[in-house]
Amino acid sequence: MSKIEPFSENIFVTRPVFPPIEEVTEKLRDIWAAKWLTNNGPQHYMLERELEQYLKVPYLSLFNNGTIALMVAIQSLRLQGDVITTPFTFAATPHVLSWNNIRPIFCDIDEDTMNIDADKIESMITPQTTAILAVHVFGTPCNVEKIQQIADAYGLKVVYDAAHAFGVEIDGQGIGNFGDISMFSFHATKVYHTLEGGALVHRNKNLKQRIDLLKNFGIKNEDEVVMTGINGKLDEVRAAIGRIMLGYVADEKEKRRKLHKVYNAELGNVAGLKLMPKCDENVKLNYQYYVIRVDEKVFGKSRDDIYDELKKYNVHARKYFHPLCSEFTCYRQLNSSRAENLPVANVIGQQVLSLPMYGDLTADDVKKICAIIKSISK
Ligand SMILES: Cc1ncc(COP(=O)(O)O)c(C=O)c1O
């Protein structure tokens, strides 16, 4: 094999989609003409309606980021006590529970999907449990049916952290239609973004009213403040960017879908590498991430070896999600955090590596990244 040359510029795990500057300038002119910068302006109103359509959900409330949105989701359902969640997620997921004075209870994950293992939830329920906070990790849907069955049987609420799952569908239904509330993140690194931003989706008009009050300090009108709200508002500039980005998300997803295929073809037969979980035909994915798992014994090198090797070629992969949330100093004292309670998550946390995935990447770039990985296998 000929020698592999390093990439001439850094290849990061993702690169935000930049809409054409002319379109942004045009929208900025509209905002300047309307003289309305934030607080439920016309761009904000229109983006909410456009996203309700795109995500096929009845009600959507925009937020300034996904974390604040999730905090408000927990508040709006008046949750307390313990909430069962996953350790294999971004820090924001358990943190929103702690910020609401709720104890996260970590449940182990499914070996295949890397989502919370629905078969293990029931045994963790106690009188203190009020809800399940599940994450559609890397855009792969959770076992929504089973989770709802458990929630119904025990009178629990279900909140989905759908930060990774923009546009994902099951049987033609938007992923936001499951559970009581779902949160989407529109952070710049996501397949669809508003620079920073997020949304809550729900199926109940009263809940929308409560959520909209909570994200605006609880201010009902000039004379009444009816709850302890927060500032979760999305401004007009970012709402306008979101409206522009809706025109580009299909193209970005299609480019990523093709790159997924290249990764699958190049790495599919490499012993010791496990690729993205295969979803049923009825699931429409968004191809936001490309994640592998490295079985060191079979591959001959560890996840960290691959990470280090890629770096030598200017490829910056990320160890998502390592460390597990249960390993954070703020959570490791919890009983549910003990490694023996989370055997699958602890193995996967050591194996997982997120490889570069964004529309500007070429098929040749992906082939080269795969060649670097394969060059160090046994
Ligand atoms: C699973 C998950 N939950 C929550 C968040 C927080 O979203 P945001 O960055 O919009 O606050 C992220 C961040 O990207 C995430 O990956």
Image: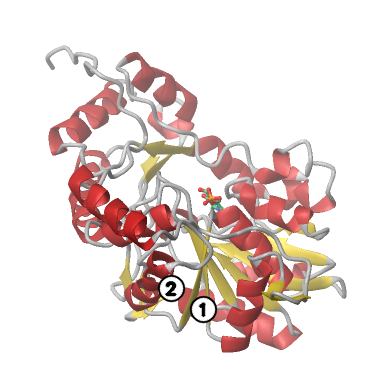
The image position of residue 285, as x and y in percent, is 32, 63
| Quarter of the picture holding the N terminus | top left
Residue 213 spot, x, y in % from top left: 66, 73
Left or right: 83 as drawn, with respect to 67: right
From the top left corner, tell me how far across and down residue 369 is, in percent: 26, 29
Q: Is residue 120 above or below residue 153?
A: above
Residue beneath label 2, please? Answer: 175
Asked whether residue 235 is in view, the answer is yes
Q: For the point 71% across and 87% down, which residue is it?
A: 153
Camera-side residue: 320 or 208?
Answer: 208
Q: Where is residue 362 shown, x and y percent of the image?
A: 16, 37
Q: Quadrant of the C terminus?
A: top left
Q: Cβ–Cβ below 8 Å for labels 1 and 2?
A: yes
Indicate if the residue with disc 1 has its beta carbon within 8 Å of ligand 1: no
Residue at 77% of width from left, 74% of height from top? 78
Does the rendering let one see residue 162? no
Occupied quadrant, residue 108: bottom right
Q: Which mark is residue 178?
A: 1
State the SS at label 1.
Answer: loop
Q: Is residue 161 above or below residue 65?
A: below
Task: Determine crowd level at label 2: few under 14, some 14-19, many 20+ residues with C-alpha closer than 10 A.
Answer: many
